[in-house]
Amino acid sequence: MKQMTYLEAGREGLAEMMREDTSVWALGEDLGRGGVFGQYHGLQTEFGKDRIADTPISESCILGSAVGAAMMGTRPVVEMRFSDFALCAVDELVNQAAKARYMFGGQTRVPMVVREPSGLWRSSAAQHSQSLEAWYAHIPGLVVVMPSTPADNRTLLMESIRCDDPVVYLEHKSLWDFEGPVDDGAEILPIGKARVARPGKDVTIVSWSAMFHTSMEAAEGLAAKGVDAEVIDLRTLWPWDKKTVFESVCKTGHLIVVHEAVQVGGFGAEIAASVTENVFSDLKSAPLRIGAPRIPISYAPTMEDEVRITAEQIIEKTLNRVGK
């Protein structure tokens, strides 16, 4: 075990895969100088400009090139800098990468990872702070991954690179400096497997990415008030681990889903609906979603804080729902 930041763990996972498989390469803007956050620092020195490739400032060009390269047998890792900027290339991702395997009857696949730094980052404003995971989960053909810890960022990135379908890989910007233990010899984490991070008996809290940590903080606060919360880190939004969630809800009888994304149309609605449809008889209360209001994110810190989900909000709403 060694301590690494979320950023370092992702960089190490990519480097390991590039050493293991020469068909793996990365492309995007300014990767040679390390990328906008430093996720690629030193990689061009080790692997050269052909495998850590700098591109023009054109998201559609970057992603379109990667789709073609993936269909021709390589495994590109595409850096979009910000998830918001990836919308400039949504046709290449949604209408080409996601559909190629189906439309060509399995004769070709698109083994590609699209890294999209996501979520709130202090004073980044409306065009650099969005959480758009529900959009991608809605599209058949796309895998959607959102790691919350350094260990998961390493192993899930490696497994995403091995995946034969296009993966939208959303790394939360506020987690870059988050440190945690990483085991180089750890078994590669399968896509689609959630983690019960905190066992409990009174209420199930399901979250992912940065909100997982906020949910864990809330669980400690709930414990002080006599509520034993089970916290699940979903890790992957598509496919998502229904079995783990259903089993937990059957035990606790209450479901709280927490996400940073706008609550309206968020992925929390899918989880709540699936639980209601499948284990309704085990529910003691209606599932509760906790998400952001449907407004643009402001630049001003005081206004930005109004849309942030806090542990205090989770505690208050959970207590109201479970009746303690």
Image (cartoon, rainbow, N blue to C red):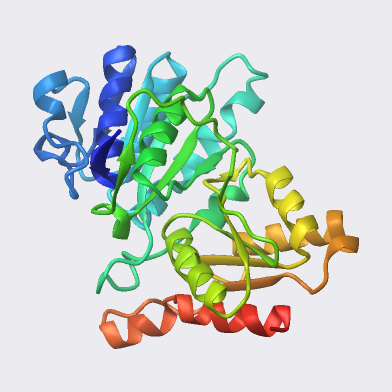
| Residue 291 makes an appearance in the image | no
The correct choice, above or below, for 60 with respect to 304 in the image is above
The correct choice, above or below, for 14 with respect to 35 in the image is above
| Image spot of residue 152 (x, y percent) | 42, 40
Image check: 169 left or right of 247?
A: left
> Observer-nearest residue: 46 or 52?
46
| Residue 104 makes an appearance in the image | yes
Residue at (60%, 24%) from the top-left corner?
101
> Observer-nearest residue: 108 or 6?
6
| Image spot of residue 243 (x, y percent) | 73, 43
Residue at (44%, 46%) from the top-left corner?
147
The correct choice, above or below, for 245 with respect to 21 in the image is below
| Image spot of residue 74 (x, y percent) | 38, 17
Residue at (61%, 54%) from the top-left corner?
199
Quarter of the figure with the N terminus: top left
Image check: 205 left or right of 286?
A: left
Image check: 312 left or right of 54?
A: right
> Observer-nearest residue: 118 or 136?
118
Residue at (46%, 42%) from the top-left corner?
168
Residue that extends furthest to the right in the rendered view of this protein? 281
| Image spot of residue 324 (x, y percent) | 69, 83
